[in-house]
Amino acid sequence: MSQLVDRTITVLRAEHDMLASLVRTFTDHQLAVTSGAAEWTVAQALSHLGSGAEIGHAPIARATGETVAAEDNQTIWARWDASAPRAQAEGFLKHDGRLLDMVEALTPEQRSSLTVDLGFLPEPVPLLTALAMRLNEVANHSWDVRVAFDPHAGVNADSAAVLVDLLAGPMDFLVSFLAKPAELAAPVSVSAPGAGLVIDDVATVVDHLESPSATFNGPQEAFVRLISGRLKAPYDNGVTVEGSVTLDDLRRVFPGF
């Protein structure tokens, strides 16, 4: 499990560096372009990531024994929402970098033993779960930003590989939360690159399937976007599903966030 923590931190840093290199070049006009999340501009998508980094920093810092006086979430969101687009972009760079600097400095013992009280779950969770949830946000919303300027953009391949392992493990609860299995008339099992998807009363990502009833034909990053509701035309890039369900069936199960 400690190896998965390390891999998660590594791809979080790669995501930051990739997105930061773009953000530093954005004009005011580009910040105002609609992102892959149709209700947000590029700046608003960056604001969501930046405010999430600010909010996520405090509970991990507390888990290390640091005394942190943090604003409540509503106050933080309101402050970010009231900021100008340029300030939202610069705030993302600052707060996401600060969060990463902190987690990269954690010792191996801390990485394996820390539990984090996120405030909205019933009990504290292992550090890996907190980082997994952050990676899911970052990888998908980074795609939201990048696809605004490149219709062929995908979720970073390394991030997708880690996310599939996380969705089949410590972040399995998120799959069932996002899914609407009642959209299907019967249970299905779908093979996908490096994983499988079982949809019955709940939806579950598994590490493999012996006898799937359908096959997802597409890259691993597209499978990740399916789960997050981002595998929509014109961004489905030739992905097909063969067997007992169609791609449209699966998109109804995972409408997105």
Image (tube, rainbow, N blue to C red):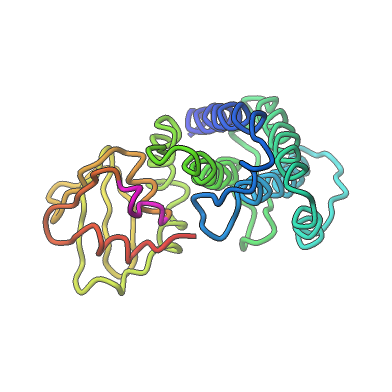
Asked if residue 173 is among those painted magenta in the image, a careful observer would answer no
Compared to residue 9, the image places residue 40 above or below, namely below
- Residue 93, position in %: x, y? 71, 34
Q: Does the magenta-highlighted stretch encompass residue 233?
A: yes
Compared across the picture, whether 69 is left or right of 246 comes to right
Residue 131 pos. (x, y %): 58, 41
Q: What residue is shown at x 26% (from left), y 67% (from top)?
A: 200
- Give the residue drawn at x 17%, y 61%: 245
- Give the left or right position of residue 248, taking residue 108 as reference: left
Q: Residue drawn 70% across and 25% down? A: 105
The answer to which image quadrant residue 207 occupies is: top left
Between 123 and 151, the residue placed more toward the observer is: 151
Residue 116 visible in the current orientation: no
Q: Which residue is drawn at 20% across and 62% down?
A: 188
* Residue 250 position by quadrant: bottom left
Residue 33 visible to the viewer: yes
Q: Where is residue 169 in the image (x, y as percent from the top left)?
A: 41, 46
Q: In which quarter of the image is residue 228?
A: bottom left
What's the magenta bit mostly, secondary-structure-wise?
A: loop
Q: Is residue 235 left or right of residue 28?
A: left
Magenta residues (range):
229-236
Give how far across and how far down residue 111 sits, in percent: 61, 32
Front residue of 31/126: it is 31
Nearer to us in this view, 222 or 185:
222
Instruction: Count up the numbered dots.
Output: 0
Q: In this view, does 18 lie to the left or right of 166?
A: right
In depth, the one of 185 and 39 nearer the eye is 39
